[in-house]
Amino acid sequence: MFFDRKDFSDQILLDLYRTLLFPRMVEEKMLVLLRQGRISKWFSGIGQEAISAGVVSALAPDEWIMPLHRNLGIFTGRQMPLNKLFLQWQGSEEGYSNGRERSFHFGSREHHICGMISHLGPQLALADGVALAYKLRHENKCAVAFSGEGGTSEGDFHEALNLAAVWDLPVIFVIENNGYGLSTPAIEQFRCNRLADKGIGYGMESVQIDGNNILDVYDTIRGVREYCIREQKPYLVECMTFRMRGHEEASGTKYIPAELFEEWSKKDPVSCYETWLADNGLLFEEKIKEIRYEFRTIIESAIAVTENPIIPDTEKELRDMYAEIPRHDVITESHSPDPETAPSKRFIEGIREGLWQSMEEQDNLILMGQDIAAYGGAFKITEGFLEKFGKERVRNTPLCESAIVGASLGLALEGYKSVMEMQFADFATVGFNQIVNNLAKIHYRWGQSASTVIRMPTGGGVGAGPFHSQSNEAWFTNVPGLKVVYPSTPADAKGLLNAAILDTNPVLYFEHKVLYRSISGPVPEHYYITEIGKANLVRNGTDISIITYGAGVHWATALADQNPEISFHILDLRSLLPLDYEAIRESVQKTGKVILLHEDTLTGGIGGEISAWIGEHCFELLDAPVMRCASLDTAIPFNLQLEKNFMANARLWETVEKLLAY
Ligand SMILES: Cc1ncc(C[n+]2csc(CCOP(=O)(O)OP(=O)(O)O)c2C)c(N)n1
């Protein structure tokens, strides 16, 4: 292997050796521990260490890295204490994730490392978000994200690279091409000659290098980093390497031809570099022994302190799913505002005003979404925002929901808040993984908050068919770590949006499209919040309780207006996650007869969950079975008559009659 020392000092060359050798020795120890059954799983990076060591050495210590499962060298290269790493790998409470995460699936703010979730691909867009934060602050920094060659087949790879290119973000995308996915060879993974060639398609500079040559990696990344910062552009680096062990230790290597191991063992990154240093008089045998002894001692003493079993604390487990909301002195409007003092506005204006005032209040708030800038968004909610707040904060995005949700998390890592407009709630499906796995779980996993809001224009009634009208809120109420809010009045539309933006957790904000321009009501002009998790008593009554939200609130009040002889008790939940159980209990107590009404389909809708809770906790308060009134268990149809028939509202009166007659 040819090493070109360029202008590197002896000290740099020796430091690189140490950064390269240490993870190799840690790994060798891990393999022993694995055989002894002291750790459960290990993804080996033996043979690939030069990539992590070169990358981490070329970056500033406060530049974020998004490593994967074979990048031990990133963690050790950032000087993370080895004993804490061992504790992490053994699932100890004293590791980096309170025993909640395995192997490399954790991060550390202190070390500017955001570890992966299991899914390959989504971490790439986080680097975009971080790089956007650097760019907005005009900092001389760039972010780095890793992918294996297998991971490049994921849609997330495409979205992240395209977004970085379009937004001119200083990100280095590093592909570690070790020839195999789990067992799948590169020939069954892609058809381009070199993965570096993909850069051309994104309008991005790229290079293919020898990933086993520490000096090549270090020098390339150093230069590429300078380029990314100077030019404010991303760069793709393909590092050719080989994995000398199985995908993970239990999976073996039978599927890899033996000749490949022979060939690549001659290119071992550690021994080749060691030999070169020795040949050039920079290392000698005694020194090598001394360094290895030093490392062995560190490693042995780090493992010695690892045997504390976790005593589960359920309260703590539940609490840690969410980040604490910081104290603030914003006015909380908990009830419907006074129509005498607050001007009447349409629902859409409530949303718009909340967004506008939040943008004024918080200059670290970024808006992102398709067509939201000059065009003002599909529903014109952000019309005029570009002119007022500028194109850095009001950002049109390419069509890449997953990358934008990922970027919002990257922004959060760097202290920015963002509101993403999902053009229609239906399209959350293509950002689903980022929402339910990355945003939702990160705080529980390693204490990082994901302070983002996703606006979800939702619901039917406009004849828009199965993919522009769905009620998909229940997909998310099943995911701990998320908050789900769903206003029904203009005042709550504003207050809940402001609260969502102030919250430190990921909040899905559902806004019903039919309500946008059909509903008006008093909206206080000042900046205020409506507390998340608090329901609103719309009507106090004694015969039947209707517990509902969104459009359901208006169906219920219309029905109550038409039937004044029945005393309806109507509760607007406003928040679906968390639910206001106290208000639900009070509603049950008031009438003993409960209808759970929602536009969402019946099976698996939130009504089922609330019904179960009432059955468990309020059984003695009931005078009749809890009834659910929901939309049909079908896709939502296009034809208006079919759609009307689909809607829960079509069966509301018959449900009331049934319950009254019980
Ligand atoms: C989205 C997703 N699909 C499948 C897997 C299972 N899986 C884990 S690692 C792996 C192979 C990855 O290959 P590559 O990206 O080349 O990285 P390498 O493991 O070779 O470093 C697979 C299929 C996963 N983690 N995520």
Image (cartoon, grey):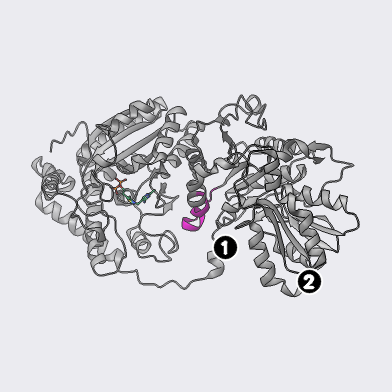
User: In the image, is residue 386 part of the stretch drawn in magenta?
Assistant: no
Element on which disc 1 rests: helix
Place of residue 197 in the rendered image (x, y in percent of width and height, measured from the top left): 29, 29
> In this rendering, does residue 142 appear at all?
no
Give the CA separation, mark 1 to mark 2: 35 Å
- Which numbered circle lies on residue 319? 1
Indicate the position of residue 309 as horizontal and vertical percent values. Answer: 40, 73
Q: 627 or 234, which is in the foreground?
A: 627
Mark 1, other Cα within 10 Å: few <14 / some 14–19 / many ≥20: few
Magenta extent: 439-450
Secondary element at tag 2: loop
Q: Is mark 2 within 8 Å of ligand 1?
A: no
Q: Main secondary structure of the magenta part?
A: helix
Question: Is 390 positioned to the left or the right of 203 in the image?
Answer: right
Task: Report whether 365 appears left or right of 403.
Answer: right
Residue 606 visible in the current orientation = yes
